[in-house]
Amino acid sequence: MRLSTLNDGLNVFSDVPKTARGHLGLAFYEAVARLIFHLRDRARSSSKTIKPIFETLPFLSSYWNELSRRFPQICETEQFSGILRAECERWEESCEAWLPLRALRRRELLSAESVTCLVLAGMIEEDSNFGDLFAMLQQPLGQRRPTLGLIHALMRTDVPEAGAAEFCRPLMEMGLLVPANREAPRAEWELRVPAPLWSALLGQLSAEPLPGTHYRPRDDFASIPDLILAPEQRARLSELVSILSSTRACTVAIRGLVGSPRIEILGSIARTVGRGLLEADGQIQSDPERRRLIGPLATLINAIPVLCFDLGSGETVEIPPLSGYEGPVGISAGRDGGWAGPLTDRMVTIDLPPETPEQRLRYWQQELKDHSAEDLEEVANSFTLSGGHIRRAAKVAAAHAAMDGRAKIVSADVRRATRNLGQRLEFLATRLEEAGTWTDLVVPSSTDRALRELEWRCRHREQLAALMGRGMPGGLNRGVRSLFEGPSGTGKTLAARILAAELGFDLYRVDLAALMNKYIGETEKNLSRVLSRAEDLDVILLLDEGDSLMTRRTEVKTSHDRYANLETNYLLQRLETYVGIVIVTTNIGSAIDSAFRRRLDVIVKFHLPDAEERWRLWQLHLPAQHAVSTGELETIALRHEMAGGQIRNASVQAALLAMQGRRGLITAGDLRSAIHSEYRKAGAAVPVEEEERSRDGQEQRLSGFLSAIS
């Protein structure tokens, strides 16, 4: 680290750039002076001069020459140190820029000697030649970083009664100095400055100053009046800033969906108090060494530290105090989980509700400055995305429109853009392709009517919540909770896929049985994560095999019963507050706890198809060209009581048999063989001809139905 030798007469260091690096350079030269005077004193004690040392270590002479040019009359150590420090303070007073060393000294009440100890420990980071010098001074240890014993020898010149341990202790408590070998005697502790902190002292600010962290300067954030929030929320934030201005320590926790503007709000608070933001992933809590650096790093870069958590239900994390930092702390988290520790003693919590259609429209207008949409208001109403997701989706949607050669964005572009966001859910659930229309679903009229009502409820869920929510006891959110109950193969999953296609939503299926974990509390965490991500991404969530967790709660006789009931209670409560669209399927509707049924908005019952419905299912699933006569197909529809899923499987199997026989068209024999295969798979006996002939009356009714629709 070199300083220019020019001097304009105003101050010895007036030519030094008014930057963090320039400030560290001044402290660096003060530390170099201590080293040189220490070497000179050692040489004098042996009746020698310092000249041989300069010859052995020529890099030192360059530092000495520069000091000599700036201070032609270099006096004894004590006198010179005072003069040098006074000149450094004059330079500092004239500098308006952010100086990490100055902030560290003022906020943490560090002495000038402690700052010198810090710089001595970090000299090798700037000039590796100092490593050779330290190794020479610390023989026979040969350590290339200064030990506590060496720093003691360098510092005792000014304050004989104070040891280096007294100067270094606060630095080690703050994490600014780290002993590399604590198992050694204290005097042999090799001290180092963590690389991220040394970079911060130099004013080198990167987007990721420490693994697991992200730094954003204050200019990245909008002011509080410009945030897309309800007026009462902005007013509360302004009051909160007043509180932060009058106190040094306060924790602000923002809860909301993942895509909600949690970080933006904390960033606006930081901007208002003149700071940036240092986001730290909650996983950093499991790494004590990295965690210790968050506080001093935030102090050095003038940022508010924000701890980001993704907690499951019932999960509590202990947050230790941030050593090396004094000031407000932010927490960004979802609606589940909690915290404990000193930082929670003075905590203000703000819960963010989902954005309204008007707020979403503002987000779209803000992001699509250079683009237009066919109906932006319709997009804002149709896609209940949070503000953060809208920011990302808008750019991708514009790119999709451009690739198709269109200037205007359409709903299909937005849906393709939001599908990219769904990757966060795919490790917990499986995306199902949307399929067909309601005409492709063969169900009784009562089931069809219930499904159409469900679609209507989903389309107008937000308007309904706005109309009824405030005045209704207990409130009403925009969530839609439905139950599809009926035997396997009756079209429950197909109905969910068609509903997704009609609404233009993505559909994700979760096997509830697979989410259940033998370890206590893990099932609730798994459920919490999948439900939180699904409602955040505005998708339809299909919870398969709902009876695995929604069965009637039992009397507690064993610990297993107690924990099973806890899991059921959690799902019961979570579905009540769910703000997305969720469909639960079950084959055993009678086993579902009545408490769940009361909380469901729509219950759709699926039944095994009757003869007329089976005939329509065969018509839908068989290829347009086949060799099965109308009479044969009527007989099959009447005499084989199969579910829709079995009919689909039999149609595919019959096509394979036709391909193997190189017949090209499916024959009645192929179809009967495939049907027999389905019976065997189900473990059921194939109906005999005599039993089938006894149903002539039913055949006549089927014939009458076919004649009526012909």
Image (cartoon, grey):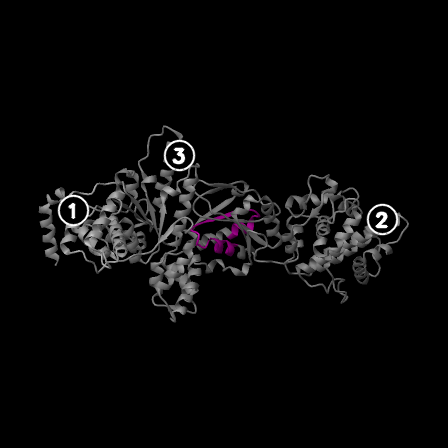
Question: Viewed as shown, does residue 179 lie left or right of 417?
Answer: right
Q: Which residue is denoted by mark 2 in the rendering?
A: 42
Residue 370, horizontal then vertical, whole percent = 43, 69
Tell me the kind of residue under disc 2: Arg
Region rendered in magenta: 241-269
Position of residue 323 measured from the top left corner of the image (x, y, whole percent) = 61, 45
Q: At numbered mark 1, what does the secondary structure look like: helix, strand or loop?
A: helix
- Using the rendered view, name the quadrant where residue 393 is placed: bottom left
Look at label 3 and name its amino acid. Answer: Tyr
Upstream in the sequence, badge 2 or badge 1? Answer: 2
Earlier residue among tags 3 and 2: 2
- Towards the viewer: 390 or 299: 390
Which residue type does callout 1 highlight? Arg
Callout 3 crowding tier (Cα within 10 Å): few <14, some 14–19, many ≥20: some
Mark-to-mark CA distance, 2 and 1: 109 Å
Numbered disc in front, either 3 or 2: 3
The image quarter containing residue 597 is top left
- For the C terminus, give its image quadrant: bottom left
Residue at the far front: name it.
Answer: 661
Query: Which labelled disc corresponds to residue 563?
Result: 3
